[in-house]
Amino acid sequence: MALPAFALFGPPGCGKGTQAVMIKDRLGFLHVSTGDIFRNAIARKDPQAMEAQEIMQRGELVPDELIRDMLSNELSILLKEQKDAKGLILDGFPRTVNQAGLLDALLEQHQLRFMGVLSLEVEEEELIQRLINRAKEQGRADDTEDVIRERMRVYREKTQPLEEYYKDKKMYFAANGVGSLEEVYTRIVPIIQSWM
Ligand code: AMP
């Protein structure tokens, strides 16, 4: 049977990446982060990624088709290497309504069964504080408060509409993203297990 896949959804700083790693380690899912794929492509000086690097540094979204192609390549490699995976977590994709359309073809191409989006809900001011602290802790010098606020604005404008899009399809599942890592994990794990 096709492997179940879902997208972790929510604004920057909502804890998607951390929860994704917990789901990966404890439930045996594959974790694919388009932000990581893009950063890795820049690190190995991939020409197309280098061209889009400035866009990312401004806190904006890189072109849909570029992200789609990078994600598709990564999926081909991962799904071939890790045949015993229990499912797939998409982290950072889809991020626009257009990407949600592109996702359908990707799912079919890679024989994945899409279960929906799982949203971690956190207030915006708490998110901005979390991101500022993370930038300090991890020494992300280019993650200034201005860039963080821009990423939040882009989220509201381009990504937030996906909430209605998936609600209409009855594929939107939300959990409170405030609390300890374990508290949040406990809230989302029954939803994920119902898809396995
Ligand atoms: P993230 O680590 O998910 O916050 O992603 C970091 C940056 O990579 C984003 O601010 C975008 O510039 C770019 N990026 C990641 N995923 C996507 C996507 N699905 N669509 C467009 N740009 C993306």
Image: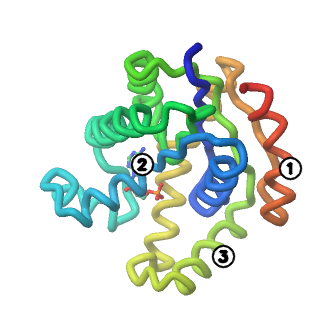
Q: Residue at x 57, y 35 (%)?
A: 85
Q: Mark 2 points at which residue?
A: 34
Note whether residue 161 is visible. Answer: no
Of labels 1 and 2, earlier in sequence is: 2
**Would the CB of label 2 be found within 8 Å of ligand 1?**
yes
In the image, taking residue 30 as reference, residue 179 lies left or right, namely right
Q: Which amino acid does label 3 sit on?
A: Gln
Specify whether tag 3 is near ligand 1 (CB below 8 Å).
Answer: no
In the visual, does 192 lie left or right of 155? right
Label 3 neighbourhood size at 10 Å, few (<14), some (14-19), many (20+)?
some
Nearer-N-terminus badge (3/2): 2
Residue 115 rendering spot, x and y as whole percentages: 65, 24
Q: How crowded is mark 2: few (under 14 residues within 10 Å), some or many (20 or more)?
A: many
Q: Which marked residue is nearer to the observer: mark 3 or mark 1?
A: 1
> Can you name the residue that lies furthest to the left here?
47
Earlier residue among tags 3 and 1: 3
Give the Cα separation between the discs numbered 3 and 1: 24 Å
Residue at point 57%, 59% (across, down): 12
Percent x, y of residue 114: 58, 23
| 57 vs 21, nearest the viewer | 21
- Residue labelled with disc 1: 186
- Apparent side of residue 7 relative to residue 57 in the rendered image (left or right): right
1 to 66, vertically: above or below = above
Q: Label 3 belongs to which residue? A: 129
Label 2: which secondary element:
helix
Tag 1: amino acid: Thr
> Residue visible at 44% across and 26% down?
103
Name the amino acid type tagged 2: Thr
